[in-house]
Amino acid sequence: MFVTGLVLAAGSSRRLGRPKQLLPYRGGTLLDAALDTARQCAFDQLLVTVGSYADDVREQADLSGCTVVDSVTHTEGCSSSIVSALDQIDTRADALVLLLGDQPGVDPRTVDRVAAVDEPVVVCRYDDGIGHPFRFARGVFPELAVLHGDKAVWKVIESGRVPVTELRVDGPIPPDVDTWADYEQLVGDPHG
């Protein structure tokens, strides 16, 4: 299978008030950590979306090995980043795996396990709920192409229109950073 990875990093960080993609984290930035995870995965293609703070992200984050996609309507939620990236997905891709640019604690082995499950939609079932990474087979791309707003990908998962397979992953959902308190908790967590 040919699998494309997509790291969503175009957000405007409204709740945080500054570009969370560029917050210091483990000797780099928060986005660097998420991209390092993605580079360890068995992706055949790796995309990253930028939008808010795009110039700063290009300047300060290590985007090597990635095709950078401009999410021109990034203020309309993460769905616009997915829609923007669909045109950049290699025509050979059998599936797309979504990762969040503000969630550095995802295990690359989990990503590879998700990527290998050949089902229409695959999500991770952690001890405390469903979380990323998500995998979408090519047959689901038309559903992704019409997404609108934030959390829209969850609407596809919860719609009942597409079969969803849950992959069991031990442990809690890896934290993502939406607020300053989230960031402080992440950097204070030795496993974060």
Image (cartoon, grey):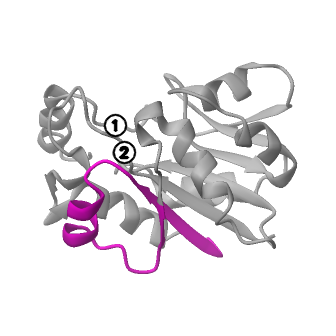
Q: What stretch is highlighted in magenta?
A: 43-69
36 or 190, which lies in front? 36
> Image quarter for residue 75?
top left
102 or 11, which lies in front? 11
Q: Where is residue 63 in the image (x, y as percent from the top left)?
A: 36, 73
Q: Residue 13 carries which label?
A: none
Give yes or no for contact between labels 1 and 2 (Cβ–Cβ under 8 Å): yes
Q: Residue 176 carries which label?
A: 1
Residue type at mark 1: give it.
Asp
Say which element carries label 2: loop
Q: Where is residue 53 in the image (x, y as percent from the top left)?
A: 25, 52
115 on left or right of 85: right
Say which element carries label 1: loop
Quadrant of image for the C terminus: top left
23 on left or right of 124: left
Quadrant of image for the N terminus: bottom right
Using the rendered image of the protein, determine whether residue 170 is visible from the camera's viewpoint. no
Q: Residue 103 carries which label?
A: 2
Using the rendered image of the protein, determine whether residue 163 is visible from the camera's viewpoint. yes
